[in-house]
Amino acid sequence: MASPSRAPDSADRIYFTLTALMGGVLLIYFASVPLLGLNVAFHFYLMLWITMASAFNVASGFAGYMPFGYVAFYGIGAFTTAILVKKAAFPVFLALPLSGVAGIVLALLFAPTLRLSGIYFGIVSLALAGICRLVITNMPEEITGGSFGLQLGSRAHPVQSFYVMMAVMVVALAVILWLSRSRLGKALRATRDDADAAEMMGVNVPIVRLWGWLISAFFPAVCGGVEAWYTNVVDTETAFNTLITAKTVIYAVAGGLGTVTGPVLGAVAMVWLDELIWRQFPLLNLLILGLATIVLVLFLPRGIVGTLLRKKPQWRRYIP
Amino acid sequence: MELLILNGLVNGLIVGGIYALVGVSLTLLYGVLRVVNFAHGEFVIAGSFLAFVLFTSFGIPPLLAVPIAAVVFFIAGWGLYYVLIPRLARSDDPELMSFLMFYGVSIAAAALMLLLFEADSRTIDYTFTPVSVQVGPIYVSTARLVAFAITVVVSIALALFLFKTLPGKALRAAIMNPEAIQIMGVDIVRLSAFAFALASALAGVTGVLIALVFPAFNPFSGAEYTIIAFIVVVLGGLGNPVGALLAGVLFGLAEQMATVFLPQAMAQIVGFLILVGTIFFRPSGILGVRFKR
C-alpha cells in the first residue's frame, strides 16, 4: 500500500464488497423472476414492501419521526397515476414520476408538522392521513370514481410493471445507500440524536429534516402509482388502508431502523412469513400480523440487524 | 331550525359524555404509564360486544352489563398490564414503541373480534319502555338518556375517586411526578397495573354505553373511537383527566352541531382539523395546564 490516505481502508473495502455482493444477488434474483417463471405477483409485492419499508426508514430510522399516516403518500401516488392515466389520458410512464411529485407536494404541505416530535408527530400524521382519505373520498365522482374507484382499463402489463417496480426499488436503495454515507445522512442522524447540538455544529436543522422527509415521501407515492398500474384499479378503501402503514412500519422495525439492510431484510422475512401464513390460514392473517407486531416490539425492539449490531458493535463499519 | 339546534345540543351532550369517558380512560393511561394506547377503541368496542353477547346469549339487559363489563375489563386489564408493559419499559424509547405495540394490539383485537363475530354490524335489540322521553320540545330516546345518566354517575364517581381518596391522589401524583411518588414509598408497578386496569374497566363500561347510544357497531368501529379518544385527550391536554372530561363534552357538542350544519364527511374532517389545530396552536390543551413528566 503506497499511500494510506488514498487507499480505501479495509473496513471500507469490506463494506463496499458486502454492498456489491448483496446488491448483485438482489438484482440478479429479481431480474430473473419473470424469466424463470417464478411467482410474479409475490415478488412484485416483495419489492414494493422493500421500497416502502426502506423509504419509511429514512423518516424514522434516520430522522427520528414516526409518521403513522405514512399511507397518505402511497394513496396520493396511487390516485395521481390513476387520475392522470384514466381522466387525462397520460401515458403511464409520464404519470408515474408525477405521482412522485404529488408525494413531494403533499410532504411539503405537511412540512410544518416536522417541528413536532414523538407521539405528537405520530398523532398529527395519523390525522392528516385521515383528512387526505376523506377529501379524496368526497371529491366529485367524475374525478376519483367515488366508492367504485377508478379502473385503468387495458393498460395492465404485469411484466413491464414488475420491472418498473424493480427499477423504483433499485433507485430507492441506491439513494438510501448514498444517504447513509453522505453529509446529509450524517446531519440527519445528528439532528435525530440531539437537534440543539447538531445546530451548534452548523447543521441547518429544518432544511436537513425537510430533505429527509421529502426522500421519505417520494418513494411511497411512486409505489402507489406502480401498484395502481399493476392491479389496474384504485379505490380509497385500499389506497388509504391503514394496514399499508402498519405493514410498512412493522417490516421496517422487524429488520431494524437506521440501517440500509435492516428494512430490506425485515421486508423479505416478514413478506415471506406473511405469504406462508396467508396460504395456510387466510382468516388468521390479520390476527397473526397483530401478534407478530406485539412480539417484535417486546422481544426484538431493535429488529434483526439492530440486535445483531448491538451484540457485535464492531460490525457497524462493515454492514451497510 | 331552532329545534334542530336544540336536538344537536342535547345529542351533543349525550355523545359528548361518551367521548369524555373514552378520553378520560386513555388520558389516565397515558398520564400514569406514558404509553399511548392505540388499541383503546378496540377495548371500547370489545365492551360493546360483551354487552351484545350478555344480552343475546344470556338475556342480561345492558344496565346489568355495565357492572359486569367493569369487573371483566378490570381483571383483563390487570393481566394485560403484566404481559405487555414491564417488558416494553426496557426498550430504547418506550413511549414511541408503546404506540407501535398497541398498533399491534389494535390489529390483533380487531381481528379477534372479526373471527368471533364476523364483519356484520351488530345492534342490541333491547328497548326501554317508553322508547323515548319528551325533553322540552324534543324527543330523546330513553336508551340515550339512561346512557347519559350512567356517564354522569361514572364521571362523578371517577372525579371523587381521583380527588378524595388516597389511591386516586396517588394516581394524580404519579401523573405529575412519577419519580417523587416512588420516593414517597408508592409501589409504582402496582399503581401502574391499577391504572391500566381502571382505564380498561372504564373502556369496557363506555363500550356498553356505546351499544345503547349508537345504532350499530362492528369489529372495525374501534379505529373511529381511537381517533376520537386522541382528539379528546389532546384537546384536554395529554394526561389531564379533568381536561379530558371537559374536552369530550365540548367535542361531542362540536361534532353534533357540525352534523347539523355540514355534510357528514365535512363533520369528520372538522374533528381531524380540531386535533391538528390544537397540537399546533395550543399543545397543552384547552385548560392550558401542562402536566410535566
Image (cartoon, grey):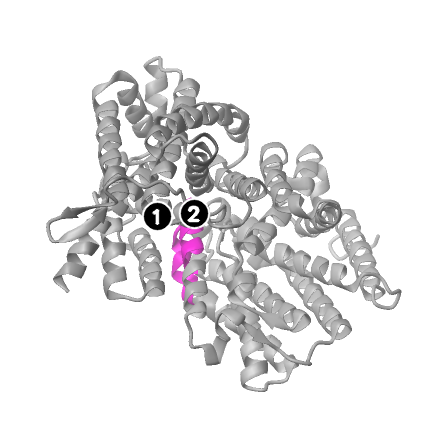
Q: Main secondary structure of the magenta part?
A: helix
Residue A232, horizontal then vertical, whole percent: 65, 73
Q: Please give the range of residues in magenta.
A: A109-128
Q: Tell me the kind of residue under disc 1.
A: Phe
Furthest-top residue in view?
B185
Q: Residues within 10 Å of mark 2 (few under 14, many from 20)?
A: many
Front residue of this view, candidates B292 and B65: B65
Furthest-front residue in view?
B129
Front residue of this view, candidates A284 and A21: A284
Q: Tell me the kind of residue under disc 2.
A: Phe
Residue B274, horizontal then vertical, whole percent: 30, 56
Front residue of this view, candidates B112 and A11: B112
Q: Any mark on residue B214, and which?
A: 1
**Residue in the picture at 34% in, 37% down:** B27
Residue B197, horizontal then vertical, whole percent: 41, 26
Which residue lies under the disc numbered 2?
Answer: B217
| In the image: residue A107, left or right of residue B159 | right
**Residue A310 position (above or below residue A117):** above
**Residue in the picture at 54% in, 75% down:** A80
Furthest-left residue in view?
B136
Q: CA distance from mark 1 to mark 2?
A: 8 Å
Disc 1: host chain = B
Q: Quadrant of residue A303?
A: top right
Q: Is residue A214 visible?
A: no
Q: Is residue A20 visible?
A: yes
* Magenta stretch holds residue A118: yes
